[in-house]
Image: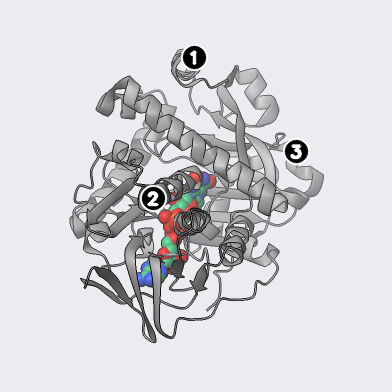
């Protein structure tokens, strides 16, 4: 069992593994999936006095949690405008506050457990076509109703930080920060173990059932009997737990990392903030130590890595920053995000003692922390704030038809993005 060949894995000291499950064990709670959702739920349950066994099919944070962009900010994959349209302003404010608590959780856990995982602060969202009025409207909405203090920059200022004619206005969220996600997840796992949790890597849950008031999870060499089972398998869960499989669509996205560019990187990116654009399927990137650029983007429903991934990502990067020449891409990888149809998390109790916390989409660093806290508070203290997500539900994502639909809508989004940039269609909403 090894980690995928990411820059994160290369930079992370080899962690001692956790043993595979053998034999029969009992616990208050069995968590399935050792990503950030499962780890945070485990940590918070242990802190509330519950006994926890965590089953991870591969290694801790082997999935999206150990290979993502590392941007941490409040909010959800569905923007606040979309949430307001569905549940109204007051409920959106409550949801946003939960997402902010998730953001704050990551900050304090990092300060406490893994300060070295903190890599920088600020998130700059840049427009690829002029859009001052819309940006100002969004900034005002966020300031008035969600107490944010984002700053809007004119194109000239944006281009001092991002030296590309592709960009126009931009907005900086100073409270956001960026991290080394694998280091963070491994630190959480160590804390789970320190608190008395039993972590088992290489322990794929193969089946489950409820019997005698307990959930029974089977792996190839062992069995866990627990009062509660929490499924946190996201895009990697396959068909194990039907309520999750039917409501989560795995969507791939991609990252590549350049060779170290040293000071030369400033000819392109002169900000320590993480950067993204507002296209429907935009780029996200940041500068890493040594002047490497981590460049993320694209989405797809395919499970296999596309051919020439590193070159394609480099082409995307050079279409924004041709002045970078032809840097070598030293790493390129894919990862699966779990999306519900409504782009909001799915936090539910589909049966007695059965829970799922999933579908964080591309906004999972804060929302996994939020969900872990909510699930732990629900199991340990009967707290029912997780029900704030009930209006979104867990609609069927459409199986293979859903996959084909997402792929087609991505291609349509790309086409519309190109037309937008040429000013050929009227943009109706941005992805913040
Ligand atoms: C390339 C990429 C870039 C991203 N960038 C960002 C970003 O910058 N900011 C942000 O907020 N979000 C980002 N995201 C999203 C974020 O990483 C995810 O939403 C989040 O990590 C999901 O965490 P999770 O714990 O739900 O799932 P995962 O981290 O995917 O964990 C699921 C785990 O379950 C395990 N598992 C599956 N089946 C079984 C089984 N049967 N038994 C036991 N274990 C099992 C898997 O091995 C896996 O380790 C990105 C995602 C990707 C892929």
- Which residue is found at the position 51% from the left and 27% from the top? 127
Quadrant location, the C terminus:
top left
Residue at label 1?
Answer: 136
Residue 266's tag is: 3
- Determine if residue 405 is in view: yes
Q: Secondary structure at mark 1?
A: helix
- N-terminal-most mark, 2 or 3: 3
Q: Is the shortest distance between ligand 1 and the CB of mark 3 under 8 Å?
A: no
Q: Position of residue 362 (x, y in %)?
A: 44, 46
Front residue of 273 and 365: 365
Asked whether the beta carbons under mark 3 and mark 1 sit within 8 Å of each other, the answer is no
Disc nearest the viewer among 3 and 1:
1
* Residue shown at the point (52%, 61%) measured from the top left: 333
Q: Is residue 361 visible?
A: no
- Name the quadrant containing residue 177: top right
**CA distance separating discs 2 and 3:** 43 Å
What residue is disc 2 on?
375
Work out whether mark 2 precedes mark 1 in sequence or the reverse, and give the earlier one. Answer: 1
Task: Give the mark nearer the N terminus: 3 vs 1.
Answer: 1
Q: Position of residue 238 (x, y in %)?
A: 30, 67
Horizontal side of residue 407 vs 144, given as left or right: left
**Position of 163 compared to 362: left or right?**
right
């Amino acid at each position: 069992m090894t980690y995928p060949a990411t820059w994160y894995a290369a930079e992370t000291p080899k962690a001692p593994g956790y043993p595979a499950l053998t034999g029969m064990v009992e616990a208050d709670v069995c968590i399935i999936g050792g990503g950030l959702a499962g780890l945070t739920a485990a940590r918070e349950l242990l802190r509330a006095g519950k006994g926890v066994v965590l089953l991870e099919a591969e290694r801790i944070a082997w999935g999206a949690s150990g290979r993502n962009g590392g941007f941490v900010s409040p909010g959800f994959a569905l923007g606040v405008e979309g949430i307001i349209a569905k549940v109204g302003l007051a409920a959106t404010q409550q949801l946003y506050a939960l997402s902010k608590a998730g953001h704050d959780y990551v900050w304090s856990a990092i300060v406490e457990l893994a300060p070295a995982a903190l890599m920088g602060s600020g998130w700059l969202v840049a427009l690829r076509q002029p859009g001052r009025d819309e940006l100002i409207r969004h900034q005002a909405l966020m300031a008035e109703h969600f107490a944010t203090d984002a700053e809007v920059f004119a194109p000239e200022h944006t281009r001092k930080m991002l030296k590309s004619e592709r960009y126009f206005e931009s907005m900086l969220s100073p409270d956001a920060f960026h991290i080394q996600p694998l280091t963070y997840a491994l630190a959480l796992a160590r804390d789970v173990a320190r608190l008395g949790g039993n972590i088992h890597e290489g322990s794929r849950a193969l089946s489950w059932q409820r019997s005698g008031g307990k959930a029974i999870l089977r792996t190839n060499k062992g069995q866990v009997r627990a009062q509660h089972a929490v499924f946190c398998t996201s895009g990697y869960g396959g068909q194990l737990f039907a309520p999750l499989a039917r409501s989560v669509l795995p969507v791939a996205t991609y990252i590549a990392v350049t060779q170290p560019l040293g000071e030369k990187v400033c000819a392109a990116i002169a900000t320590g903030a993480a950067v993204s654009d507002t296209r429907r399927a935009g780029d996200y990137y940041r500068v890493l130590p040594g002047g490497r650029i981590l460049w993320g983007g694209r989405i797809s429903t395919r499970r296999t890595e596309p051919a020439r991934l590193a070159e394609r990502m480099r082409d995307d990067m050079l279409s924004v920053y041709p002045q970078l020449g032809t840097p070598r891409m030293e790493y390129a990888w894919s990862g699966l995000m779990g999306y519900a149809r409504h782009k909001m998390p799915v936090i539910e109790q589909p049966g007695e003692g059965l829970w799922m916390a999933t579908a964080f989409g591309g906004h999972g660093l804060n929302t996994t922390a939020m969900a872990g806290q909510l699930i732990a508070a629900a199991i340990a203290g009967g707290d029912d704030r997780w029900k704030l997500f009930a209006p979104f539900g867990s609609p069927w994502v459409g199986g293979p038809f859903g996959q084909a639909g997402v792929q087609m809508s991505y291609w349509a989004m790309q086409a519309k993005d190109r037309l937008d940039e040429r000013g050929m269609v009227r943009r109706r909403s941005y992805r913040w």
